[in-house]
Amino acid sequence: MLGKLLKHEFRATARMMLPMLAVLFGLNLLADASMLLAEHTREGFLAFLLALIVGLFFVGVIVAVVMTLVVLTLRFYRNFFGDEGYVTFTLPATVHEQLWAKLLAALVWFFATMLEIALCFGLMGLTLSLMQGFDFSGIVWDNLREALRQFGTLGLDSLFAMLIGTLVMLLQLYAAMSLGQMFSKKVLMSVVFFFALNLVASILGSAVTVPALFHPVVSPQSYPDAVRLFSHLIRSNNFTQLVFGVALYFCSVLCLKKRLNLA
Amino acid sequence: MPILECRMLTKRYGELAALDGVNLAVEAGHVVGLLGPNGSGKTTLIKLANGLLSPTSGEVLIGGKLPGPETKRLVSYLPDRCCLPDWMNSEQLIDFYSDFYEDFDAARAGEMLSHLKIDAKMRVRAMSKGTREKVQLILVMSRRAKLYLLDEPIGGVDPATRDYILETIIRNYDPEAAVVISTHLIADVEPILDEAVFINNGRVVLQKSVDELRAESGKSVDETFREVFRCWENS
């Protein structure tokens, strides 16, 4: 059943996400072409226009991230608590399957957006390297190797933190909406619960990071100790986020199972 | 065992009781009219049976089980409004229903669509209100379900569409299944009913077979309904 739910979830979200990603990629190609053209133009207005296109791409990047969040949040709300909810919640699927389908599809779209943004910046770097005559891929590779040598597993911890951070952000949105739907003013209460959960997340985050900063063994003045401290902080934070995420997940499950209110 | 059973089913919204201790049993093979004025609790009862609302107290059982994924396999539900995703077309909707319901007959749905000359490629958002309701009904009645819960299937449509909807219900339902039709348009559904349940202010005030009701009162169900609810209004 999860496979079927995922199929239809991707079908529903792709009609918004794919054109958006295509537009962003198109903007990037335009920006790259503009940079190449700008090298050979002396005309003021044309140069301004080309710079505007490059600027538009950077605005596009911000819009793409915001749009991804908006599209996926609206999809969750409408498909669960709007009129579509009457179809969604009469499907022979468990609440767990329904939630996982939303969560996995949203994660895939978030990482697809991030990957495309990274790809776009990579293309931009490649264009710059063509213009200035430096070895872009060599620089990227050398820097990656150096970062891995210096920071070791810190990079992996940071990647894991990014994954958990996205997961928890989505779960926080889902939990806020699942709690909010129990009231007559669903949207307003969802917003209130989102900020309340945010407050809880901040308190939990501080409770873990602040004591770690005063750890007696490590001294941030020493470089290896600083890396170790960061690593320790990220890992502690990952663990807290994971626990918080699990709590948010079961909060949503409980609301949808026991307190669904499609009144 | 009744296919639908309510035991002291109560649903409150704050102080207001939308359903107040409802006891009800619907057996397979019957077409039951859930009849009552607007706001009497018909929709609440149907939503509770579908697990779209949680009861304040009491329970509703489908084939002896509380609403959940298993009971949703048995129930085909027509909501009182169009709830189909408006970006989908009929073809995609048939694919959607075929994927999730093993008892969905895609060929039957396709036949009904072409019989009504509904373009399978037309998106729901481009359809008229009547066409949307027909498409939703086609999807619901193309299932071989054990229980059909139809909430106001003929409310707000023209008489020709009304006739088509009632004809579709009768032609397509499995005689071993039960059909519960919630409506306040009694005269239109009376010819197809086996049993009538009168509901008012969240309480079942009468549950009888239609033949028995007619024989006892010497009146049609519609006339009895008017009489019963006139009494309630005056009391």
Image: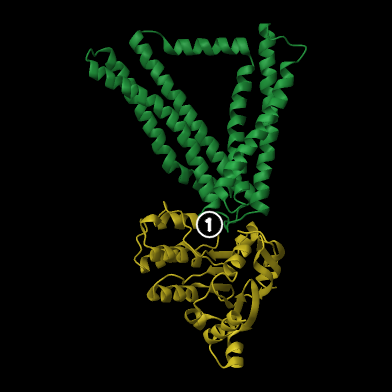
Chain colours: A green, B yellow
**Residue occupying the far front of the picture:** B234
Residue A124: percent from left, percent from top: 39, 19
Of residue A140 and residue A206, the one placed in the foreground of this image is: A206
Quick one: quadrant of the C terminus of chain B?
bottom right
- Residue type of the residue flagged with mark 1: Val
Residue A209: percent from left, percent from top: 70, 22
Quick one: quadrant of the N terminus of chain B?
bottom right
Could you tell me which residue is drawn at 68 percent across and 26 percent down? A237
Quarter-wise, where is residue B108 in the image?
bottom left
Residue A198: percent from left, percent from top: 63, 34
Residue B24 lies, with reference to residue A153, above or below; the image says: below
- B163 horizontally vs B216: left or right: left
Quarter-wise, where is residue B193 in the image?
bottom right
Give the number of callouts: 1
**Residue occupying the far top of the picture:** A222
- A156 horizontally vs B93: left or right: right
**Residue occupying the far right of the picture:** A216
* Residues packed near mark 1 inside 10 Å, few (<14), some (14 to 19) or many (20 plus): many
Residue A197: percent from left, percent from top: 64, 37
Disc 1 designates what residue? A87
- B99 horizontally vs B8: left or right: left
Of residue A105 and residue B57, the one placed in the foreground of this image is: B57
* Element type where label 1 sits in the image: helix
- A52 horizontally vs B212: left or right: left
Residue A229 lies, with reference to residue B200, above or below; the image says: above
Dot 1: chain letter: A
Of residue A45 and residue A196, the one placed in the foreground of this image is: A196
Residue B26 visible, this orientation? no
